Image (spheres, grey):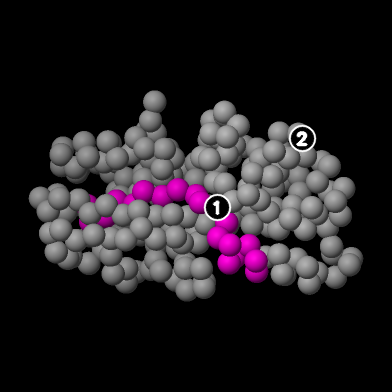
Amino acid sequence: MGSVTTIEPGLEGSLVELLEVLGRTTDAMVAIDGEMRIIAWNDAATSLLGYDASEALGRPCHEILCWRNRCGDTVCDGDCPSALPGEADELVETQEVLGLSATGRSLWLSASSIVPPLEIRDQCRLVHLVREVSLPPELERVIIERVQDLSPRATPRSSELDVLTPREHEVLELLTQGLDGAAIAEQLFVSPATVRNHIQHILSKLGVHNRVEAVALALRNR
């Protein structure tokens, strides 16, 4: 069964049907109107970003998404060019961005944007389909370099990884290979939700804030 979508009341029936169909994907689905307010939010978006639909609906999208490019420059703000009216057949390129979860955890994301048909575009300007992707090589190199520059006192010890269960070691190893949550789930024959739970346990046990730090620690202790 696909993800359940929560939609702002008062939208046209054809738009509601479209958003419900798009929201069944395993990707996070976020729909925004011409004023850049969030009008639809599915369960996958809650799982990925940590906000309930009740917290997200009606809010400016940039307050929730907080997207930046790999250089740290803001790409999602109140002047988003993608929300401006354009041609009937306009396309929005898929982009990889850095986002933040509700708890402040950094996420490397792939965001595809769908422009609805003209007849419903007055109510819905864009639909984002978002998934977490593997750590980009450039960022991984930066993290490794920074870890190597740590003082001996702060250098993590290999014994720190011993707190992980065998399954958590498997998940962490697959993260270091650049696999995202969906690919890990497929590799281990478990659900994406189970993988997310394993990753949260790994972060908690290792005392790190996000997957980037966990991968860096694992690579350092190889």
> Where, by quadrant of the figure, is residue 149 drawn?
bottom right
Residue drawn at the location 57% of the way across and 46% of the way down: 179
Q: Which of 102 and 196 is in front in this view?
A: 196
Q: Is residue 125 left or right of residue 53?
A: left
Q: Is residue 52 left or right of residue 193?
A: left
Residue labelled with disc 1: 134
Q: Position of residue 131 (x, y in %)?
A: 45, 48
Q: Which of 52 and 114 is in front in this view?
A: 114
Q: What residue type is labelled 1?
A: Ser
Q: Nearer the viewer's eye, disc 2 or disc 1? A: 1
The question of residue 40 being in magenta is answered with: no
Q: Position of residue 70 (x, y in %)?
A: 51, 68
Indicate the secondary structure of the residue bearing disc 2: loop
> Where, by quadrant of the figure, is residue 162 drawn?
top right
Residue labelled with disc 2: 165
Q: Which of marks 2 and 1 is nearer the N terminus?
A: 1
Q: What residue type is labelled 2?
A: Thr
Q: Where is residue 120 in the image (x, y as percent from the top left)?
A: 14, 49
Instruction: Inspect this view and state whether residue 90 appears.
Output: yes
Q: Give the range drawn in magenta.
A: 124-142
The question of residue 131 being in magenta is answered with: yes
Residue drawn at the location 89% of the way across and 65% of the way down: 153
Q: Which mark is residue 197?
A: none
Q: Is 125 placed above or below 44 here?
A: below
Label 1 crowd (10 A; few <14 / some 14-19 / many >=20):
many
> Where, by quadrant of the figure, is residue 41 drawn?
top left
